[in-house]
Image: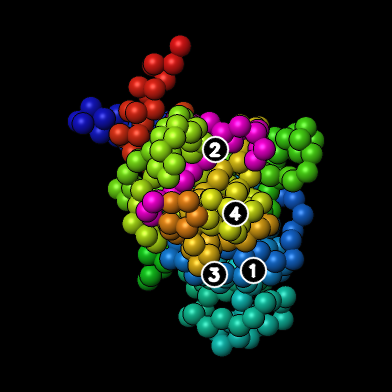
């Protein structure tokens, strides 16, 4: 452990940002870093609905999403921000203003003379990130410009403030911080714990507004739905909440007593346990379907390949998304139930490389092989043993 801490200290003092990310992965075995290719801002939808980490539904209109696109565009031309820095900025703007350009006439009457989306009243704060002229973020005219606010939030060598106040790129080793902690390091809010709640919403926005070169190729090859490339993978149940009770492959059917092929992995968990999306994607089915009970199908693009994930046995009230919704990896999408052909509360999980109509593979093995965050050590060991036994 002392050697590891010594390596971390050395990298912090001497190493480049890439080294910092490598050390983060070393410190946290569940951390993954997946390149999503060249991210481009695509068409801006008229609206988007997503859920916060605590389950609250947030509806965003086209104007709010346009501000999100501005943040993403500035991030794209600011070196070293990347996807994670973009998510942090979106989390901050969602928390501070719900992605609205807020004037503050009580502090600065002239702010009403600039395009705005409403009135704020937090001290002398203005705009998307609620930046204060008195704190040195900029003039009223500058801070009523969404692009300027985004540049100020990211900071760095191309930022307008020369590191004071500090933007994200001015925070030492920001890549090692929790996303909420990184947002707080820039915003210096009196309520530092608010930001993390908006991470699923920020990820949903990024997925909805982003088009990637890989996703374009996937759509061209397979036709139909354009599903942006995911940037990370997550296990569908929180660590410590489940037990793997029935694996993929031949088994004795608990209803008929006959040997049948089981296309999924059964993860027993208490009723109501949160079910999380394994990756960024688009919901293509959400409702009751035969022996599956409440079923959700989500289409993803992983390493250029179309992947469909199935989540089964939810009750109607346990399905939290609808067909056509865009979701982010790790987002709450439903609750464990026991509907359909089920002997008790559990999640039946299927993974179909090639899309919903392609054959399923072992879901646990597939998630382990692709470095899903949140996969328990026991599950990883099991998958590794299976791989060793495979000819």
Report which residue position mark 3 lands on. 57
Within 10 Å of disc 3 (Cα), the crowding (few <14, some 14-19, many 20+) is few
Left or right position of 130 against 236: right
Residue 107: x and y in percent read 55, 84
Is residue 250 visible in the rendered image? The answer is: yes
- Picture layout, residue 387 above or below residue 279: above
Report which residue position mark 1 lands on. 60
Labels 2 and 4: the sequence-earlier one: 4
Residue mark closest to the camera, 3 vs 1: 3
| Badge number at residue 289 | 4
Q: Are marks 2 and 1 in contact (CB under 8 Å)?
A: no
Marks 3/2: CA–CA distance: 27 Å
| Badge number at residue 278 | none
Q: Are marks 2 and 4 in contact (CB under 8 Å)?
A: no
Marks 2/1: CA–CA distance: 31 Å
Q: Are marks 3 and 1 in contact (CB under 8 Å)?
A: no
Residue mark closest to the camera, 2 vs 4: 4
Marks 2/4: CA–CA distance: 17 Å
Is residue 236 visible in the rendered image? The answer is: no
Q: Secondary structure at mark 3?
A: strand
Marks 3/1: CA–CA distance: 10 Å
Q: Secondary structure at mark 1?
A: strand
Labels 3 and 4: the sequence-earlier one: 3
The residue shown at (39%, 22%) is 386
The quarter of the image holding the C terminus is top left
Residue range of the region highlighted in magenta in the rendering: 343-366
Q: Secondary structure at mark 2?
A: strand
Left or right position of 316 against 306: left
Report which residue position mark 2 lands on. 351
The residue shown at (78%, 32%) is 221
């Amino acid at each position: 452990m002392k050697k590891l801490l010594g390596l971390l200290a050395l990298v912090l003092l001497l190493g480049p940002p890439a080294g910092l990310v490598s050390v983060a992965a070393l410190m946290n075995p569940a951390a993954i870093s997946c390149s999503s290719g060249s991210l481009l801002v695509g068409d801006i939808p008229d609206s988007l609905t997503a859920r916060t980490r605590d389950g609250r539904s947030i509806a965003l209109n086209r104007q709010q999403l346009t501000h999100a696109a501005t943040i993403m565009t500035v991030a794209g031309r600011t070196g070293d921000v990347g996807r994670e820095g973009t998510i942090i900025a979106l989390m901050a703007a969602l928390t501070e203003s719900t992605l609205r350009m807020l004037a503050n006439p009580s502090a600065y009457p002239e702010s009403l003379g600039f395009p705005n989306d409403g009135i704020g009243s937090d001290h002398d704060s203005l705009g998307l990130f609620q930046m204060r002229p008195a704190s040195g973020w900029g003039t009223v005219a500058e801070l009523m410009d969404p692009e300027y606010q985004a540049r100020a939030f990211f900071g760095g060598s191309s930022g307008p403030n020369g590191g004071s106040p500090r933007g994200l790129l001015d925070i030492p080793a920001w890549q090692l911080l929790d996303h909420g902690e990184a947002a707080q390091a820039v915003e210096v809010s009196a309520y530092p714990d608010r930001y993390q709640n908006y991470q699923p919403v920020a990820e949903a926005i990024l997925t909805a507004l982003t088009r990637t070169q890989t996703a374009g190729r996937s759509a061209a090859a397979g036709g139909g739905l354009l599903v942006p490339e995911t940037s990370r993978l997550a296990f569908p149940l929180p660590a410590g909440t489940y037990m793997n009770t029935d694996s993929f492959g031949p088994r004795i059917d608990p209803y008929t007593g006959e040997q049948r092929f089981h296309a999924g992995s059964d993860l027993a968990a208490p009723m109501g346990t949160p079910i999380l999306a394994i990756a960024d994607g688009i919901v293509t089915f959400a409702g009751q379907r035969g022996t599956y009970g409440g079923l959700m199908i989500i289409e993803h693009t992983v390493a250029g390949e179309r992947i469909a994930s199935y989540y089964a046995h939810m009750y109607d009230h346990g399905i939290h998304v609808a067909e056509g919704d865009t979701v982010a990896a790790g987002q709450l999408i439903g609750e464990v139930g026991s509907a359909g052909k089920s002997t008790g509360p559990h999640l039946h999980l299927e993974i179909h490389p090639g899309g919903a109509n392609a054959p399923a593979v072992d879901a646990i093995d597939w998630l382990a092989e692709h470095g899903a965050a949140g996969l328990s050590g026991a599950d990883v060991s099991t998958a590794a043993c299976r791989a060793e036994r495979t000819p």
